[in-house]
Image (cartoon, rainbow, N blue to C red):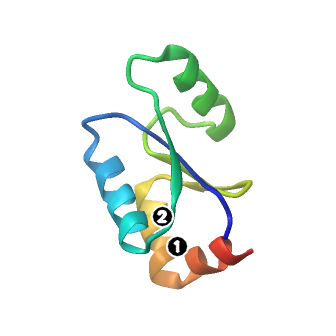
């Protein structure tokens, strides 16, 4: 299974929702909190080209945010990415 990385902030409802989906699917993930950490937020922004959280990767593939993760789940793409 591919490694999943998710950049989050503590009180972001979209982060909670994305992590809930991954937890429900029993997908382990590496969470990188960016609140109060400008260096990590800058790292996330450079990698994703976006400043909003969550930002999610499956392996080297940038999935995007929560909406994109949910769309990938609905289409079956998430399972394909996880198996790749």
Q: Is residue 61 above or below residue 30?
A: below
* Mark 1, secondary structure of its residue: helix
Say left or right for 28 vs 1: left
Q: Position of residue 18 (x, y in %)?
A: 38, 58
Say left or right for 22 vs 77: left
Rendered-image quadrant of the C terminus: bottom right
* Mark 2, secondary structure of its residue: helix
Q: Is residue 50 above or below residue 57?
A: above
Q: Position of residue 5 (x, y in %)?
A: 58, 49
Q: Position of residue 68 (x, y in %)?
A: 49, 62
Residue depicted at 70% across the width and 58% down the height: 59
Q: Position of residue 30 (x, y in %)?
A: 54, 47
Marks 1/2 in contact by CB < 8 Å: the verdict is yes
Q: Is residue 38 above or below residue 63?
A: above
Residue under numbered circle 1: 72
Cα distance between the residues tagged 1 and 2: 5 Å
Where is residue 52, by image quadrant?
A: top left
Q: Is residue 84 above or below residue 10?
A: below
Give the tally of numbered discs.
Answer: 2
Residue under numbered circle 2: 69
Residue depicted at 44% across the width and 45% down the height: 54
Where is residue 81, by image quadrant?
A: bottom right
Rendered-image quadrant of the N terminus: bottom right
């Amino acid at each position: 299974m591919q490694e999943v990385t998710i950049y989050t902030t503590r009180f972001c409802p979209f982060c909670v929702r994305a992590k809930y989906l991954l937890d429900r699917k029993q997908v382990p993930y590496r969470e990188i909190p960016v609140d109060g950490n400008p260096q990590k937020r800058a790292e996330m922004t450079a990698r994703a080209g976006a400043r909003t959280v969550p930002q999610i990767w499956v392996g080297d593939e940038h999935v995007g945010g929560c909406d994109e993760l949910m769309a990938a789940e609905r289409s079956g793409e998430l399972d394909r990415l996880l198996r790749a």
